C-alpha cells in the first residue's frame, strides 16, 4: 500500500538555525499538509497546500515557516530560525482530490531544538 | 469554532474485554469524522471515517464507530480488545474548505491493555 514517507526521523538543531523537513506524499495525491504535535499535547494543523500554493495556514504558521514543493515528489517544511518552542513531532499528510478523501500521515520527524 | 473533545485521557482494559472510546465534536455543518491510532514512535494510522450515510461505520482491526448527531458524538468501539491495541487514539473532525479537509484533533485517549 502506498505511504507517506518523511525524512529524517529525528533532527537535532541548534536554536537559531534553519531546518528543512522533507516529505514524499503518496504519488497521486494532490493536497498536502503539515501538522505538529508538541510532546504531551494534541496534534495541531499548520498548513495545507494545493496547486503549488498555500490553501490555508494556522496562526502557528508565521513568517518563520515556509513550505515548498520543489519537484514532482517532495514536499518540504522549512523553519528559518528555530526556537526552543519549535521542538515537536512534525507530521506530513496527503490526500486525494475531494472533500471525502481521508488524509494519510507519515511517521513524523521528531525535531529537537537545543 | 470547530473542536473535538475526548473526555478520557487514559483508559485501561483487560485483554478480551470490550472497549468504547468517547468523542464529542462541535461543528456547524455536517461533520466529516475520523479516528486515527498512533502506536509509540509511529505516525497516525486511519482506523475509520464517517462522511455520510450509515451512521455505524466499520474500520480496520475490528473497530467500529457510531455517529450520533443528536449527541454530537462519534464513539469508537471494539467488542474484544487485543494486547496489540494498546496505543493512543485520536478523534478528528474535518473542517471542510473547498476540496479538502483541515483536521482538528482531540487531545487523544491512551489505551493500556492488561493481559
Image (cartoon, grey):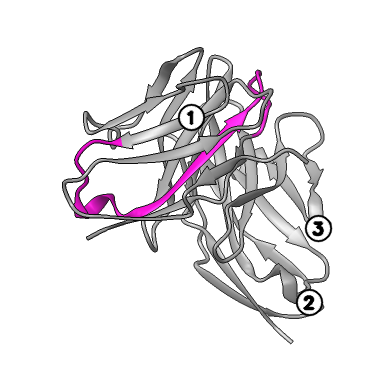
Label 3: element kind: helix
* Mark 3 crowd level (few <14, some 14–19, many ≥20, 10 Å Cα): few
Between marks 2 and 1, how big is the CA–CA gap?
42 Å
Q: Which residue is mark 2?
A: B17
The answer to the question of whether label 1 and label 3 lie on touching residues, with beta carbons closer than 8 A, is no
Report whether mark 1 lies on the same chain as mark 3.
no
Q: Is A29 drawn above or below residue A43 in the view shown? A: above
Is B76 colored magenta in this rendering?
no
Kindly report which numbered mark, 2 or 3, lies closer to the viewer in this rendering.
3
- Identified at 58% across, 49% down, the residue is B91
Q: Which residue is mark 1?
A: A75
The answer to the question of whether label 2 and label 1 lie on touching residues, with beta carbons closer than 8 A, is no
Specify the subunit that label 3 lies on: B
Task: Please indicate whether residue A63 sits to the left or right of residue A58 in the image.
Answer: left
Residue range (magenta)? A79-102
Kindly report which numbered mark, 1 or 3, lies closer to the viewer in this rendering.
1
Report whether mark 2 lies on the same chain as mark 3.
yes
- Identified at 64% across, 24% down, the residue is A29
Which image quarter holds the N terminus of chain B? top left
Residue A37 coordinates in the image, percent (x, y): 41, 52
Q: Which residue is mark 3?
A: B61
Between marks 1 and 3, how big is the CA–CA gap?
30 Å
Q: Is residue A57 or residue B5 the one in the foreground?
A: A57
Which image quarter holds the C terminus of chain B? bottom right
* Mark 2 crowd level (few <14, some 14–19, many ≥20, 10 Å Cα): few
Specify the subunit that label 1 lies on: A
Specify the subunit that label 2 lies on: B
**Disc number placed over residue A48 in the picture, else none:** none
Q: Which one is earlier in the sequence, the residue at label 2 or at label 3?
A: 2
| Residue B74 can be seen, yes or no | yes
Report whether mark 2 lies on the same chain as mark 1.
no
Is A89 colored magenta in this rendering?
yes
Amino acid at each position: 500500500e502506498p505511504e507517506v514517507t518523511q525524512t529524517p526521523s529525528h533532527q537535532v538543531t541548534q536554536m537559531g538555525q534553519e531546518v528543512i523537513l522533507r516529505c514524499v506524499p503518496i504519488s497521486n495525491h494532490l493536497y498536502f499538509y503539515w501538522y505538529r504535535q508538541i510532546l504531551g499535547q494534541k496534534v495541531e494543523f499548520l498548513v495545507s497546500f494545493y496547486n503549488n500554493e498555500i490553501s490555508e495556514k494556522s496562526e502557528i504558521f508565521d513568517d518563520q515557516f515556509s513550505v515548498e514543493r520543489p519537484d514532482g515528489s517532495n514536499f518540504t517544511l522549512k523553519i528559518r530560525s528555530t526556537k526552543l518552542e519549535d521542538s515537536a513531532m512534525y507530521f506530513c499528510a496527503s490526500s486525494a482530490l475531494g472533500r471525502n478523501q481521508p488524509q494519510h500521515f507519515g511517521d513524523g520527524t521528531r525535531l529537537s531544538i537545543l | 469554532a470547530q473542536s473535538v473533545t475526548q473526555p478520557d485521557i487514559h483508559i485501561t482494559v483487560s485483554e478480551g474485554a470490550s472497549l468504547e472510546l468517547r468523542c464529542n465534536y462541535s461543528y456547524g455543518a455536517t461533520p466529516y469524522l475520523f479516528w486515527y491510532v498512533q502506536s509509540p514512535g509511529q505516525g497516525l494510522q486511519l482506523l475509520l471515517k464517517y462522511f455520510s450515510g450509515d451512521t455505524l461505520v466499520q474500520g480496520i482491526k475490528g473497530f467500529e464507530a457510531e455517529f450520533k448527531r443528536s449527541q454530537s458524538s462519534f464513539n469508537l468501539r471494539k467488542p474484544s480488545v487485543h494486547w496489540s491495541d494498546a496505543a493512543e487514539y485520536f478523534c478528528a473532525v474535518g473542517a471542510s474548505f473547498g476540496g479538502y479537509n483541515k483536521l482538528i484533533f482531540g487531545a487523544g485517549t491512551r489505551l493500556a491493555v492488561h493481559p
